[in-house]
Image: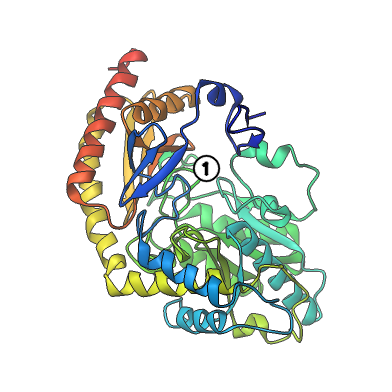
Amino acid sequence: MAVIKGEANSGLILCRTPQDRVEAGVPVIVRGEGCRVFDQAGKSYLDFTSGVTRPVHLGFGNRELAQAAAAQAAEMAYFTPMGFTNPRALELAAALAQVTPAGIDNFFFVCDGSEAVESAMKLAKQSHADRGQPQRFKIISRRGAYHGVTSLALRALGTVLPMRHIMEPMAPGAVFVESPYCYRCPLHLAHPDCELACARDLRRIIEFEGPDTISVFIGEPVQQGFGALSPPEGYWQVIREILDDYSIYLIIDEVICGFGRTGRMFGSEHFKAKPDLITMAKGITSGYVPLGAVGASDQVLEPIEMFEHLHTYANHPVACAAGLKNLEILEREGLVERAAGIGAYFLEALKPLTRHAIVGEVRGVGCWLGLDFTTDKKTRADFPLANLMSLVERARQKGLVIKLMGQAIELAPPLIIEKDEIDQGVAVLDQCIAEEAGAMGLA
């Protein structure tokens, strides 16, 4: 159990951190500025991960955003979301209606992405029930998916399996289909000759499960579980057509992709996905205040007289104030468009790393990129987790924060990152990969 012990730091439990890492020394981050953070020893780290879990779109130390939250807290910090509301929640809902995908015009605010996914699934379930179809309880997710860690969200977890397995048995009704992981196709096919078999197989799964038992299909426009994995062209159109045939709702999980990460305001814009519900978090406040959101179409809400759901901190005025200011800054400074341009530069800077024997594929969209690793480029053999962890640690020691995801290294810097910072970080990453390949005898 990863618990920090000591005179000054006694009893703090860390998430997903092994005990040996704690014993070796966990950096205590005390300050951030731009794309850099600093630990209590004064060491500087260039952050290629926007805070590791990728929320910090505006970078660290944005005083305008911090002051907006502080001002709201001083004016009116909290009141219940049940039977009452507040100006900031109303304003943020109106602002989101202007930028979210067509038809997503109604919003509910929670604390994070897991709560957003949970709330979206409950909203879909109640919508079906209030239409006279309470038997629709199943959710379809994808192997390789990550949608959070609350109870219903965990049912849809198709990766980081110990997180789900430890908590089993879960509530029944989770169904999985394959992901469009073309680099290591789970169906052993090759795109485009596959004719999007991974998407078309959805119909077979629905028929097998019983169409009238299925509530929703949930998916990320770009998947994190394999490391910034974009689907092939046409994938989401096929999924949408099949779901429409069976009156199944589509939840697009924009928790990572939303608010400019991919070079569009929402990732689904790249792929012409047409959601019935979307989930949002992370970049909605750039991580300065906890906030998640569900967006829903009128069709989903039409049969519901009262949503039987409640979070104490739903529609929280301080968080919504931060969300409003964050959206204002993103638009005013053109950071969504900037993410597309600087992301293209970043992708080109990474491509030469494929000269290393262990780098199998470089991919990405906007400011979300991945390097997929292999021990054999011809067979695309699996890459050992221990070596990925070693790569991450090598980078940390050299003052670069990266993260592993699946068999890839994932990069998602703040949208304000500059070209010289990209160049500095890629040089460090190049060195780390060379060292790791040499240690593996694959230089």
Q: Position of residue 229 (x, y in %)?
A: 42, 49
The image shows residue 399, relative to residue 329, as above or below, that is above
Task: Report helix, strand or loop for mark 1.
Answer: loop
Q: Position of residue 440 (x, y in %)?
A: 37, 15
Which residue is label 1 attached to?
Answer: 187
Q: Position of residue 159 (x, y in %)?
A: 59, 42
Left or right of 315: which side holds 380? left
- The image quarter containing residue 286 is bottom left
Q: Amino acid at mark 1?
A: Leu
- Residue for point 62% across, 55% down: 141
The image shows residue 206, relative to residue 48, as above or below, that is below
Mark 1 crowdedness (10 Å alpha carbons): few <14, some 14-19, many ≥20 = some
- Residue for point 27% across, 17% down: 443
Q: Position of residue 299 (x, y in %)?
A: 63, 84
Left or right of 408: which side holds 10? right
**What is the number of callouts on the image?**
1
Residue 333 seen in the current view: yes
- The image quarter containing residue 162 is top right
The image shows residue 210, relative to residue 420, as above or below, that is below
Q: Nearer the viewer, residue 331 or 148?
A: 331
Q: Nearer the viewer, residue 235 or 251?
A: 251
